[in-house]
């Protein structure tokens, strides 16, 4: 299933080559992309590139055989339309209702319940020209999102305003536009905790774990893009989301415990996805030369002794009490179990034990061997209480499976 459909329009700017990177990025993010280009655009970038990257034919001609109703069908098909780069010529045509090509006809036929984003790219004089500025203002008043341009070196040799916005920022804006459109049908309230705790030893040293938060942020973003209301409680040093997701951070185990208890007391959630990698033991005392120092020490420990000892105290399992702490008694709790060097045959017993010990509804198992060299976790197995399994190769598959679980469960009981 594709994430959503993007109608990607290109006009005749020297920046048209940048559309190749963007199209590829959307396709890699799971979107289905169809490209519409003006005749001028195809003088700057070839159909072979656009077709190859999008996996779809490139539309240019309103009267192409078998495509004569494209100006309507493509509008119906698209979830989001983005025009990047947008020439002064096309912006001015749009603002005046001119419909002399497939690309401009599609704008006149646009369905205003769907986002339309324009990323202008042109010489500074063309950009600041009253015709262009008035057109931009008019398009904005109709509900088009006009992305800013950047100040920089332009192909004509000038330095000034009018440079196409950085492609990664255009990508983020399209994702955000789709997500905020989906907000009106917000489905579930989901809390996602992720990242690893950091237990301070002294002013400069700490003990932590290998959790990066990459899986958590990926799940959070997928569920956010599908229109769910997401709150994250993430480790301070973990990956941040690029979306406007409500977020709190934690550092130590105690900090995490305080924050999650607080969150669950004030907010109702339909689902809690508990990925946070919490320390099972927290350091309490450091023994050095027969002296005991309470931890964390404020200053930096002087390393003049051959041996030191650190005493750890066992922490409670926060996951066990999530349901009890939660305002919503019907909350679905999804826990994660990471294993390392465990025989395949032992895994069902490990999962059974987690169901017995922790009051969870689902357990997602993953093994450290499924982590790529860049730190992305792959190969997850979701277990339900009857131990039936759903395999998910990627985080994207996992997010989709979790979404089905949350959708299938009851709404919050108020
Ligand atoms: C080399 C070259 C680069 C151009 N770059 C731009 C540009 O960045 N922005 C722009 O608005 N027009 C630019 N133009 C002018 C447009 O290509 C021209 O206005 C064309 O009619 C636009 O057609 P379209 O809007 O239908 O694609 C450029 C023209 C040439 C020859």
Image (tube, grey):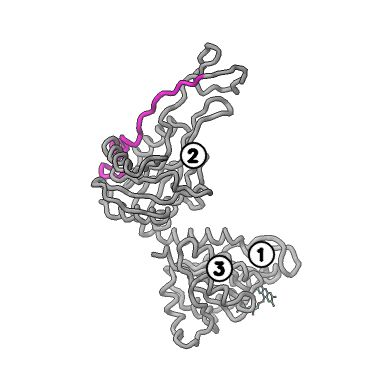
State which tag comes first along the sequence, 2 or 3: 3
Marks 2 and 3 sit apart, C-alpha to C-alpha, by 41 Å
**Element on which disc 2 rests:** loop
Q: Element under label 1?
A: strand
Residue drawn at 62 percent across, 71 percent down: 16
Counting from the top left corner in percent of width and height, residue 89 is at: 62, 77
Of the two numbered discs 1 and 2 in the rendering, the one whose residue sits closer to the viewer:
2
Q: Which residues are magenta?
A: 309-333
Which image quadrant for residue 138? bottom right
Element type where label 3 sits in the image:
strand
| Residue 315 included in the magenta stretch of the image | yes
Q: Residue furthest left?
A: 386
Residue receiving disc 1: 163
Determine the residue positioned at 40% across, 42% down.
275
Tell me which image quadrant ligand 1 sits in. bottom right
For label 3, the residue is 118
Image quarter (top left, top right, bottom left or bottom right) of the N terminus: bottom left
From the viewer's perspective, is 82 left or right of 332? right
**CA distance separating discs 1 and 3:** 13 Å
Q: Which mark is residue 210?
A: 2
Q: Is residue 7 above or below residue 397?
A: below
Name the spot of residue 127 as percent of width and height, x first.
66, 69
């Amino acid at each position: 299933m594709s994430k959503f459909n993007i109608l990607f329009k290109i006009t005749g700017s020297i920046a048209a080559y940048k559309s190749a990177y963007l199209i590829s990025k959307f396709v890699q993010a799971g979107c289905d992309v169809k490209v519409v280009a003006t005749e001028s655009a195809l003088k700057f970038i070839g159909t072979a590139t656009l077709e190859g990257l999008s996996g779809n034919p490139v539309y240019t001609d309103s009267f192409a055989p078998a495509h004569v109703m494209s100006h309507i069908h493509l509008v119906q098909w698209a979830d989001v339309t983005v025009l990047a780069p947008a020439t002064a010529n096309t912006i001015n045509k749009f603002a005046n209702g001119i419909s002399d090509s497939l690309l401009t006809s599609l704008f006149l036929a646009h369905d205003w319940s769907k986002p339309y984003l324009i990323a202008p790219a042109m010489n500074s004089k063309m950009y600041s020209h009253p015709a262009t500025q008035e057109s931009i203002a008019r398009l904005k008043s109709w509900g088009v999102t006009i992305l800013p341009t950047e100040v920089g070196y332009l192909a004509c040799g000038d330095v000034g305003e009018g440079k196409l916005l950085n492609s990664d920022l255009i990508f983020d804006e399209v994702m955000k536009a789709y997500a905020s459109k989906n907000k009106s049908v917000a489905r579930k309230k989901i809390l996602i905790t992720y990242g690893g705790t950091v237990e301070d030893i002294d002013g400069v040293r700490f003990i932590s774990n290998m959790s990066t938060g990459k899986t958590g942020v990926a799940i959070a973003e997928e569920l956010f893009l599908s229109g769910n209301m997401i709150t994250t409680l993430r480790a301070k040093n973990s990956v941040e989301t690029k979306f406007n997701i409500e977020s709190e951070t934690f550092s130590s185990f105690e900090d995490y415990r305080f924050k999650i208890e607080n969150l669950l007391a004030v907010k109702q959630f339909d689902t809690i996805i508990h990925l946070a990698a919490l320390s099972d033991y927290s350091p309490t005392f450091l023994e050095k030369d027969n002296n005991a120092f309470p931890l964390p020490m404020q200053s930096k420990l002087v390393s003049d002794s051959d041996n030191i000892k650190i005493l750890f105290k066992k922490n409670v399992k926060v996951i066990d009490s999530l349901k009890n702490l939660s305002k919503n008694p019907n909350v679905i709790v999804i826990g994660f179990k990471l294993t390392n060097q465990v025989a395949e045959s032992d895994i069902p017993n490990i999962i059974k034990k987690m169901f017995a010990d922790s009051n969870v509804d689902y357990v997602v198992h993953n093994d450290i061997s499924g982590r790529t060299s860049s730190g992305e976790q792959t190969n997850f197995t979701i277990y339900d209480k009857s131990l039936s399994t759903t395999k998910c190769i990627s985080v994207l598959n996992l997010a989709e499976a979790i979404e089905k679980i949350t959708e299938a469960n009851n709404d919050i009981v108020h």
